[in-house]
Image (tube, rainbow, N blue to C red):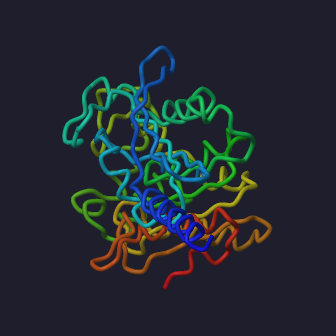
């Protein structure tokens, strides 16, 4: 009996060891296709195929440009401690392997705030797995430009139960550029200026559908959707857990924009909001010796479970 028991134990331990090793296999990034408004679209599902239970569903909204973001997506979750379960809808007309150095006219024609917002809402309602998700079960994670869109997705979809952003704040983008100009930050103050921006804002308001005229590398049609939208008003309408992370030395979005969110919610403690400021960090939350983006995303795992101290900086 003892030898039989020993053999059974050994067999169990060997199978358990195999399972543990297998369960530590790297997550996979699967490419899929869907149709939105009659157009074929590419999207990705990044997940742990061997996880006993699927992780928190995250809808990831990327930043600006026409680069193939899927190439970098897994890097952000390298320190995430729970099974990953991330969905990412690629922008219209982004070529695979594209480095973003040159965007096509077809891409620019659809590179608009209202289109990206509508596309993500439709995506959640028709992607098979997301369509089945109940109210307040999906987390929206937005980077940079995606962080500007993410609060609107949270406002307009009952499926969203958490909002996390990195590299975006609570001020209008038109105000953010003026802050940089007033601070003397190049190129906002030199060769450009506050007066230059104010003149451009007036011109964009008058000709906001123009795809030919450009400002700071994007068409007027692009800027008319981003410059004047007021994210703070949208944040104020949300009644879900929210967190916004920014680098102190962000040179794309001034830290004042993130602090505006912080200061607003300090006056509204009934809201579940946290602001995480990474000292000395860039737009990507990085310093020379710290990858704040990976750190921030790793902390989301505990935050989803209700840990109020998940983002305490060490």
User: In the current view of this chain or complex, which residue is farthest to the front?
Assistant: 1
Tally of marks: 0
**Residue 264 percent across, percent down from the top left:** 67, 67
192, 39: nearer the viewer: 39
Instruction: Point out the residue furthest to the top here.
Output: 38
Task: Depth check: give the residue in front, 139 or 117.
Answer: 139
Q: Residue at x 29, y 63 (%)?
A: 189
Residue 165 vs residue 93: left or right?
right
- Residue shown at 50% from the left, 21% from the top: 36
Q: Position of residue 192 (x, y in %)?
A: 27, 56
The answer to whether residue 167 of the structure is visible from this angle is no
Instruction: Specify the quadrant that holds the N terminus.
Output: bottom right
Q: Position of residue 268 (x, y in %)?
A: 76, 68
Q: Residue at the far right: name it.
A: 270
* 184 relative to 313 in the view: left or right: left
- Left or right, 76 with reference to 102: right
């Amino acid at each position: 009996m003892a030898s039989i028991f020993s053999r059974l134990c050994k067999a169990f331990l060997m199978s358990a060891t195999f399972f543990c090793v297998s369960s530590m296999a790297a997550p996979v990034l699967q490419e899929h296709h869907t149709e939105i408004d009659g157009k074929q679209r590419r999207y990705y599902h990044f997940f742990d195929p061997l996880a006993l239970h699927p992780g928190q569903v995250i809808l990831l909204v990327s930043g600006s440009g026409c680069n193939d973001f899927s190439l970098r997506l897994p890097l952000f979750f390298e320190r995430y401690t729970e099974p990953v379960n991330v969905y990412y809808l690629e922008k219209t007309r982004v070529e695979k392997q594209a480095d973003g150095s040159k965007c096509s006219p077809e891409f620019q024609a659809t590179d608009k705030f209202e289109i990206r917002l509508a596309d993500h809402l439709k995506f959640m309602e028709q992607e098979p797995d997301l369509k089945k998700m109940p109210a307040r079960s999906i987390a929206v994670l937005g980077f940079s430009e995606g962080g500007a869109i993410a609060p609107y997705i949270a406002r307009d979809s009952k499926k969203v139960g958490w909002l996390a952003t990195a590299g975006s704040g609570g001020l209008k983008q038109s105000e953010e550029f003026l802050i940089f100009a007033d601070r003397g930050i190049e190129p906002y103050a030199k060769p450009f200026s506050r007066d230059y921006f104010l003149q451009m804002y007036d011109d964009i308001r008058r000709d906001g559908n123009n795809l030919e005229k450009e400002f700071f590398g994007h068409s007027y049609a692009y800027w008319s959707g981003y410059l004047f939208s007021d994210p703070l008003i949208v944040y104020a309408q949300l009644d879900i857990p929210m967190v916004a992370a920014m680098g102190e030395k962000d040179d794309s979005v001034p830290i004042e924009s993130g602090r505006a969110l912080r200061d607003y919610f300090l006056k509204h403690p009934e809201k579940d909001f946290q602001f995480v400021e990474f000292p000395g960090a860039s737009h990507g939350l990085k310093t020379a010796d710290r990858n704040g983006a990976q750190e921030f995303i790793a902390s989301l795992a505990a935050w989803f479970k209700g840990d109020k101290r998940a983002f305490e900086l060490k």
